[in-house]
Image (cartoon, grey):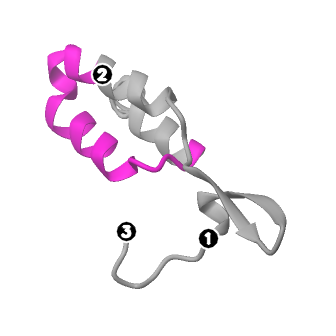
């Protein structure tokens, strides 16, 4: 049980990034996995996972402006 708690605590930055749908998920997981053991790397990954989760863009359609979140825009097959 203690081992499970330690593993969950170690990967907390990654779990937060997944839960928030973070735009830099792969980078955060990589930082967490490779540098989390240094404590400083874990802190960096954790703070990074709490930063802005999604890109936001303004799309002009005719004369109207629409705010579009990154999650609402379909991705092409060759994009992450």
Cα gap from disc 3 to disc 1, whole angstroms: 12 Å
Label 3 with label 2: CB-CB less than 8 Å = no
Q: Is residue 42 visible?
A: yes
Q: Quadrant of residue 63?
A: bottom right
Q: Which residue is mark 2?
A: 44
Dot placed on the residue nearer the N-terminal end, 3 or 2:
2
Q: Is residue 19 above or below residue 57?
A: above
Name the residue rendered at 23%, 37% in the picture: 31
Quadrant location, the C terminus: bottom left
| Whole-number angstrom distance, CA of label 1 to CA of label 2 | 29 Å
- Disc ID at residue 63: none
Q: Nearer the viewer, residue 22 or 61?
A: 61
Q: Residue 3: horizontal and vertical position, in percent? A: 33, 28
- Of badges 1 and 2, nearer the viewer stands 1
Spatial CA distance of label 3 from label 2 is 22 Å
Between 73 and 49, the one lying in front of the other is 73
Secondary structure under tag 2 reads helix
Q: Badge 3: few (under 14), some or many (20 or more) residues near its Cα, within 10 Å?
A: few
User: What is the x, y in percent for residue 23?
Assistant: 46, 50
Residue 30 sits in quarter: top left
Instruction: Give me the residue at 77% from left, 73% from top.
Output: 61
Q: Which residue is mark 1?
A: 73
Residue depth check, mark 3 versus mark 1: number of the one nearer the observer: 1
Residues shaded magenta: 20-42
């Amino acid at each position: 049980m203690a081992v499970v708690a330690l593993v969950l605590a170690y990967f907390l930055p990654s779990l937060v990034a997944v839960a928030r749908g973070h735009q830099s998920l792969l980078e955060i997981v990589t930082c967490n996995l490779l540098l989390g053991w240094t404590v400083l790397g874990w802190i960096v990954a954790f703070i990074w996972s709490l930063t802005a989760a999604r890109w936001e863009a303004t799309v002009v359609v005719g004369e109207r402006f629409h705010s579009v979140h990154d999650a609402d825009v379909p991705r092409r097959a060759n994009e992450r």
